[in-house]
Image (spheres, rainbow, N blue to C red):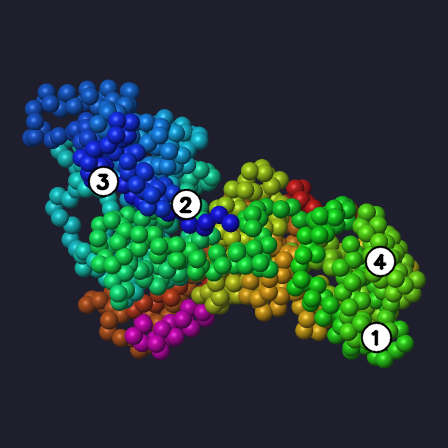
């Protein structure tokens, strides 16, 4: 199995200068020498700045115009002419780049100049930064460098300009990957609020041009300046959301390009708010930047990571990222040396539950290797006959068939004593349920007989062979569609495995409508019932995969082994307690059903009794983008014997069951959901004489309330002029989309009784304002359906 984590080291300008000073062979360069050393240390790739300080100096002299007080008009005119010549034909000088040869760039991930301000406030700085970035991208493409890491965005107000420039680069370099470097949050939210200096970097000079910062925009090291720790202080979620929201704008402007990824910078300590961290699971994380300053020393002096960062990195193994180590040779920690950092990352890889599950035989993760986040069309069981390899795949599931055998056994044990019990396996396939039925009969010492019904002519040949070799006269085979054939005698127990990922999406209700007529009045069905469940989902990877399939692909439910996804909903009901749990039940089917109108053959006159609809309300505690809906099912086989792929109950009911992955209902356009919003999802199961299909739709709302405060208020709720709440009833958005769900009433934390009273007041009078909606998907089954 390929490793989940790839290790890279950062090469700095200082490293290159030292390598040049040491000297090298006639056919070597400093970069080649450093590449060889890095490989010898166990690194698979190196992260290297593409340009030198000479390039920054020339760009600044050309594009950041000196003020009139710093030089004469001739100097300004000369700089303007040089800048215009460069804008017309951008190019580098030899001493402005770190690499010139193809062999130097073989294992390189290039870093674009960090000082470029693609989202600067000044128009000309943005313009010239964009030209410079396109120049750097063109040079990296010339050297056949596969990936370039872009400078971090800084200015939320002009983030669309950043995205526009990146989108232009994506079009100009069609074979290159672009990765945006971002911290998980802006560490400035935890820094003391100070008055800005009179002339900060970036201030407008007298001629209207802007001066960029004099140092590269590295994330500040919390250990070097007094800050409020994320563990001891809370920041509004709107501020913690800022970097993710910038990323969301960039990838949206770039139309969700699959060549645009993320480099997550873990320099700042991670916040304790898990919801802020979970959202990155659904994003295309390609690199994780880990400087030595992120590590802390353990009791022996070796570098280790804080527990929160450890947990995040273990979960991040789903991305199979490249870990870019920086400063590992700086001697920051007393013990272990440079290799200790890489060894520690490999330790986290080996101890990751994701990695361990993928390497353990018998787990779903091991079984599904290569199928994670891969869109598969659901089966068409009535229209198509399955191939033998498909049957064989499903028959590898020991959990499902164990539970089926147990359900049949318990049903036989509960059956009244009689001479003969009749079992019918409807949809026998290659015979696994027949074999399990015989085992259950033997375990229960019952006198029972089995009919096996199958419509697939090829599978029926396999059944005949197994009857001859294994089952003999204890089984009778019947060829044909269960909706059309008859069995020789009434049946006591009807057994079937017609369930799909959403319970009913492979037409189990319609198939069993034709088979329950075999049952005696007191006969039972295994399964006896099943339910469908939904949750809102974020996954840029699944969205991109569905988008590639055009309109039809965006209106088709897919079977998917989820990996790079995030369920957006949370428990708690929201501000008005209108919402249900994070995963909600849509509908249920029961068998046998006694209230269906049937004809003289026992078949339903229409399929209208199998129509279903549901309207579900979800609380969205943390801001995110919904790309689709996750569908699950649970089934009651008999008594308390069940099957489940529900995320909260599958491990208790049918752990490591392999036969079903969840269902994914995509949305054509992503729907942004702010913190503390509400999502209403409508879904329908519809039918006509020939088809069954699903339609789905969603709306988003923001809770608002006319909040009456309790009569007893602490003094600190209002300012010195008492103007914070000017009246006892103030119309507010509750909670705001820019504050965390747990901080909706931060000023009342010291008075729990006031907080409860405030929440009760919100609950009593809250309403909602609509903020977004999707289109209706798959109307009339125009793009996807299951044939009857």
Cα–Cα span, label 3 and label 4: 73 Å
Q: Tell which tag, 3 or 1, sits nearer the viewer.
A: 3
Quick one: label 3 or label 4, which is nearer the N terminus? Answer: 3
Cα–Cα span, label 2 and label 4: 54 Å
Check disc 4 and report the residue beneath it: 469
Quick one: label 1 or label 2, which is nearer the N terminus? Answer: 2
Give percent across and percent down for residue 101.
32, 27
Check disc 2 and report the residue beneath it: 286
Q: Tell which tag, 1 or 4, sits nearer the viewer.
A: 4
Element under disc 4: helix
Q: Which residues are magenta?
A: 748-764
Measured along the vertical axis of the image, is residue 46 above or below residue 728? above
Element under disc 1: loop
Q: Quadrant of residue 473?
A: bottom right
Element under disc 2: strand
Check disc 1 and report the residue beneath it: 446
């Amino acid at each position: 199995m390929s490793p989940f984590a790839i290790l890279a080291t950062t090469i700095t300008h200082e490293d290159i200068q030292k390598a040049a000073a040491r000297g090298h062979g006639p056919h070597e360069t400093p970069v080649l020498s450093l590449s060889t050393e890095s490989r010898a240390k166990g690194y698979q790739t190196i992260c290297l700045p593409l340009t030198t300080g000479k390039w920054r100096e020339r760009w600044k002299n050309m594009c950041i115009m000196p003020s009139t007080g710093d030089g004469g008009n001739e100097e300004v005119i000369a700089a303007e002419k040089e800048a215009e010549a460069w804008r017309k034909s951008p190019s580098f000088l030899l001493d402005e780049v770190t690499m010139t040869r193809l062999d130097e760039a073989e294992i390189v991930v290039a870093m674009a100049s960090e000082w470029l301000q693609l989202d600067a406030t000044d128009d000309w700085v943005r313009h010239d930064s964009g030209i410079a970035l396109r120049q750097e991208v063109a040079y990296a493409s010339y050297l056949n460098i596969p990936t370039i890491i872009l400078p971090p965005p800084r200015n939320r107000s002009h983030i669309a300009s950043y995205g526009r420039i990146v989108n232009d680069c994506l079009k100009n370099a069609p074979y290159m990957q672009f990765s945006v470097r971002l911290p998980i949050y802006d560490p400035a939210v935890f820094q003391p609020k100070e008055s800005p200096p009179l002339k900060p970097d970036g201030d407008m000079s007298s001629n209207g041009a802007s001066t960029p910062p004099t140092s590269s925009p590295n994330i500040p090291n919390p250990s070097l300046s007094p800050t409020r720790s994320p563990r001891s202080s809370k920041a509004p979620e709107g501020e913690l959301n800022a970097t993710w929201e910038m990323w969301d704008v960039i990838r949206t402007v770039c139309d969700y390009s699959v060549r645009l990824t993320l480099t997550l910078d873990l320099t700042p300590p991670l916040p304790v708010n898990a919801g802020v961290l979970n959202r990155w699971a659904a994003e295309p994380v390609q690199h994780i930047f880990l400087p030595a300053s992120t590590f802390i020393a353990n009791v022996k002096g070796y570098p280790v990571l804080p527990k929160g960062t450890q947990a995040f990195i273990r979960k991040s193994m789903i991305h199979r990222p490249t870990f870019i180590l920086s400063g590992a040779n700086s001697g920051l920690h007393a013990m272990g040396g440079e290799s200790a950092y890489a060894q520690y990352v490999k330790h986290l890889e080996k101890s990751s539950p994701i990695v361990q599950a993928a390497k353990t035989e018998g787990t779903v993760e091991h079984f599904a290797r290569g199928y994670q986040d891969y869109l598969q069309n659901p089966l068409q069981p009535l229209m198509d006959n399955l191939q033998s390899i498909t049957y064989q795949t499903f028959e590898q599931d020991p959990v499902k068939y164990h539970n089926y055998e147990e359900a049949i056994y318990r049903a036989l044990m509960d059956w009244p004593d009689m001479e003969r019990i009749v079992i019918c396996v409807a949809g026998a396939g290659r015979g696994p349920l027949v074999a399990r039925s015989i085992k259950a009969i033997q375990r229960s010492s019952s006198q029972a007989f089995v009919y096996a019904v199958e419509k697939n002519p090829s599978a029926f040949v396999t059944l005949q062979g197994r009857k001859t070799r294994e089952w003999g006269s204890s089984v009778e085979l019947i060829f044909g569609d269960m909706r059309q054939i008859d069995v020789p005698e009434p049946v006591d127990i009807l057994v079937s495995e017609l369930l799909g990922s959403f319970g009913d999406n492979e037409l189990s209700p319609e198939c069993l409508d034709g088979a329950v007529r075999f049952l005696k009045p007191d006969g039972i069905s295994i399964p006896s019932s099943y339910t469908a469940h939904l949750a809102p989902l974020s996954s840029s990877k699944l969205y991109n995969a569905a988008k590639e399939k055009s309109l039809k692909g965006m209106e088709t439910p897919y079977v998917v082994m989820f990996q790079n996804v995030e369920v957006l909903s949370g428990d708690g009901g929201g501000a008005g307690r209108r919402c249900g749990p994070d995963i909600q039940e849509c509908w249920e089917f029961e068998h046998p059903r006694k209230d269906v109108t049937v004809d003289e053959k026992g078949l339903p006159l229409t399929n209208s009794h199998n129509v279903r609809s549901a309207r579900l309300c979800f609380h969205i505690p943390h801001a995110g983008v919904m790309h689709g809906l996750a569908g699950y099912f649970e089934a009651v086989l008999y008594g308390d014997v069940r099957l489940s792929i529900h995320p909260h109950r599958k491990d208790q009911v049918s752990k490591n069951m392999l036969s079903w992955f969840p269902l994914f209902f995509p949305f054509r356009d992503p729907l942004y959901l702010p913190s503390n919003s509400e999502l209403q999802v409508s879904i329908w199961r519809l039918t006509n004489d020939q088809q069954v299909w699903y339609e789905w739709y969603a709306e988003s709302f923001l809770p608002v309330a006319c909040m009456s405060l309790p009569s007893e208020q602490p003094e600190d709720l209002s300012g010195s002029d008492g103007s914070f709440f000017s009246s006892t009833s103030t119309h507010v958005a509750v909670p705001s989309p820019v504050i965390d769900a747990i901080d909706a009433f931060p000023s009342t934390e010291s008075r729990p009784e006031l907080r409860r009273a405030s929440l009760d007041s919100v609950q009593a009078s809250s309403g909602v304002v609509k903020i977004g909606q999707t289109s209706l998907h798959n109307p009339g089954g125009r793009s996807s359906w299951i044939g009857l």
